[in-house]
Structure formats: structure tokens, C-alpha cells
Image (cartoon, helix red, strand yellow):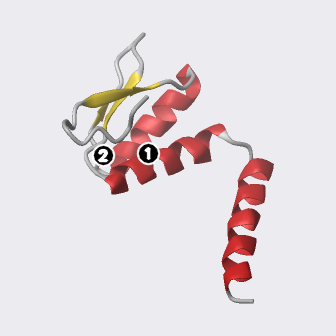
Amino acid sequence: MNLLNSNSTSYQPVEVNLGERWSIYHRLRELQIPCSCAISQPLRVEVGSPLSAIQLWSVVQSVTKNRDELVCWLNQCWESKMDKYK
């Protein structure tokens, strides 16, 4: 899936399971990212900028990953940031 197609801002399919799809859809709508979610169809998201791509990635991670995985990722980011200041 190519989320950053600079030639077009067409809707891109996002493959996630049915239960997660609606949570992601509603959060993306709150963020005012254009998306559609029809019955028996994949979630489709319009990724028109790097910011919307990052927001999509963040929303998908927050819904699909468990708490331990998210904490580990956040700790790695924090350690990487702190290493720059040593």
C-alpha cells in the first residue's frame, strides 16, 4: 500500500480487521481526515499530505497494538531522543 502517492489524493484501502476498522474510521473522522467505510468493504482513507499519513499510521497503531507494544515503542523513542543529548 502506497500511502504517499504525490500524483493523487485518491482513497487508499487500509487493511484492518472488522472490529478495528470502525474505531479507526471514527477517529480519522474526528481528525477530519476524509475516509469511507462501507459494509463488507475495506476502510478507505484519503491521504493527501505527509501529516495525514502520519496521523493514519498513529491511529492504526493505537488501535491495533497492545499497550505493552505501545509502551515499548514510546520508550525506544524516548531513549533515542535522550541519546542525542548525551
Measured from the top left, where is residue 70 in percent x and y? Answer: 71, 53
Measured from the top left, where is residue 9 in percent x and y? Answer: 21, 38
Q: Which label belongs to residue 33?
A: 2
The residue at the far bottom in this view is 86
Measured from the top left, where is residue 45 in percent x and y? Answer: 33, 34
Q: Is residue 9 left or right of residue 47?
A: left
Count residues near mark 1 (Cα–Cα under 10 Å), then give few for <14, some for 14-19, many for 20+.
many
Above or below — where is 22 with respect to 38? below
Taking the spot 27% from the left edge, 30% from the top edge, the residue there is 11
Alpha carbon separation for disc pair 2 and 1? 8 Å
Taking the spot 68% from the left edge, 67% from the top edge, the residue there is 77
Count residues near mark 2 (Cα–Cα under 10 Å), then give few for <14, some for 14-19, many for 20+.
some
Q: Residue beneath label 1, please?
A: 56
The reply to whether dot 2 and dot 1 touch (C-beta < 8 Å) is: yes
Above or below — where is 64 with respect to 54? above
Q: Which label belongs to residue 70?
A: none
The residue at the far top in this view is 40
Which element is circle 1 on?
helix
Q: Split into 4 quadrants, where in the image is the C terminus?
A: bottom right
Taking the spot 56% from the left edge, 30% from the top edge, the residue there is 20
Observer-side mark, 2 or 1, equals 1
Q: Split into 4 quadrants, where in the image is the N terminus?
A: top left
Which of the pair 84/30 is nearer the observer? 84
Above or below — where is 70 with respect to 61? below
Q: Where is residue 13, by image quadrant?
A: top left
The mark that comes first in sequence, 2 or 1, is: 2
Above or below — where is 18 with respect to 63? above
Amino acid of disc 1: Leu
Q: Where is residue 66, by image quadrant?
A: top right
Taking the spot 60% from the left edge, 48% from the top edge, the residue there is 62
Amino acid of disc 2: Ile
